[in-house]
Amino acid sequence: MNSARPESSRPEPLRPESPAQSTPPPNSADHPWPVRSVALKVAQWIDRLGSIWVEGQITQINARPGTRTAFLVLRDPAADMSLSLTCSPRLLEESPVPLTEGSRVVVFGKLSFFTGRGTVSLRVTEIRPVGVGELLARIERLRALLAAEGLFDPRLKRPLPFLPRSVGLVTGRASAAERDVLKVAQSRWPAVRFEIRNTAVQGPTAVPQILTALRELDAADDVDVIVLARGGGSVEDLLPFSDETLCRAIVACTTPVVSAIGHEPDSPLSDHVADVRAATPTDAAKRVVPDAAAERALVADLTERAAAALRRWVSREERVVAGLRSRPVLAQPWRALDERANDVDRMLAAIRRDVRRVVDADGTELAHLRARLTTLGPAATLARGYSVVQRVTAGSAPEVVREVGEMPPGTQLRVRVADGAVRAAVIGKDK
């Protein structure tokens, strides 16, 4: 805040008022606040924040010779937000490290609201450049944090498609990395398609632009893999690719991401959270698309190997069949039958002999039983002069008579003898 304001802009002192006017009316459409009151209240609220430390990247420096105030713009590395700074030109001149646009700094100052223009500025009294050592220490702390959360776990890495429909490429405009990726990929697979998003790859605007490009490519249905490509550089140049927001965005992508940042010794955090780390942009191009010539050679080699394997299999099976055909059982299949024919004939003769013997023995026994049965049967008895007397009653079968009392005079009888039967009637009884 400015120490001296025009008299008209200062808050009016409180004056004794009548009881009817002791309470100010509430703010409403009928009782609006004037602009000066709102501006003064905002200035008072901002003034309560006091002095604060702020970190960011310098994106603009305006320090004209002979002026008493230098104007700077401090930008958040991971968001499209900035803050205006004012300071003494001596702070810039006496900095142990030359401050340029893109320098990462920590400043100490107090926010001021300029009521005349309605703007907020941070009046800086101290500027501390963030050195390479501090940047590396912060990266290591962030590396340990992300590793503890499991974002480096190999089980989270998604495999790259064998032949992507389209490759998303996030790189600097007209950069060597872009030329390397396109040249190598098209030489390996001429039909490859690219969705290119040119962004800043260093400086304070790099992270927001890369995040936007990642979201667009991840949402595209035909993009099967995304490549982040950048050439080599200093620690400060590669700093955006170790930003926590960018690392978490890479992990959140549903499309596989290849990180090809810098050269082999460079190792930003994006290499660890990405699904595949490529040593260079050229290596990334080799990983995302296959080599057509190599694939054709591989197909030809596999075809030849398959044909050779088939020929070996046929030869082996032919030898097996020849071995089977040379065996006696297949060379002379009837020999075993001929050898067993005599055994079969001998067994048949033995079976017939045994059957005849059993039949003859049973025939003899049957004849004996028939003779005994004939001797003991009623026909033989009748042949010896005996007869069978039966009483004939109308409506019933004849009944054998055993006693004289069963044949009263007049009883009709049937007398059976050896050669037939006669009918008779009882005319009397003899004692």
Image (cartoon, rainbow, N blue to C red):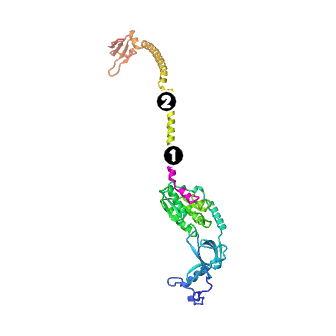
Q: Is residue 360 visible?
A: yes
Query: Observer-nearest residue: 329 or 95?
Result: 95
Q: Does the magenta stretch include residue 166?
A: no
Query: Observer-nearest residue: 78 or 191?
Result: 191
Residue 253: image quadrant is: bottom right
The answer to whether residue 156 is above or below residue 305 is below
The dominant secondary structure in magenta is helix
Q: Is 401 left, or right, of 40 in this rendering? A: left
Residue 123: image quadrant is: bottom right
Callout 2: helix, strand or loop?
helix
Q: Write the start and end of the magenta stretch as one range.
A: 277-297
Q: How crowded is mark 2: few (under 14 residues within 10 Å), some or many (20 or more)?
A: few
Image location (x, y in percent) of residue 12? 59, 88
> Which amino acid type corresponds to the residue marked 2 in the rendered image?
Arg
Q: Does the magenta stretch include residue 283?
A: yes
Identify the image quadrant of the C terminus.
top left
Q: Is 342 left, or right, of 415 in this rendering? A: right
Q: Can residue 51 be seen in this view?
A: no
Q: Residues within 10 Å of mark 1 (few under 14, many from 20)?
A: few
Q: Name the residue under label 2.
A: 325
Query: Observer-nearest residue: 391 or 264?
Result: 264
Callout 1: helix, strand or loop?
helix
Q: Which mark is residue 260?
A: none
Q: Mark 1 points at which residue?
A: 302
Residue at 56%, 80% in the rendered image: 119
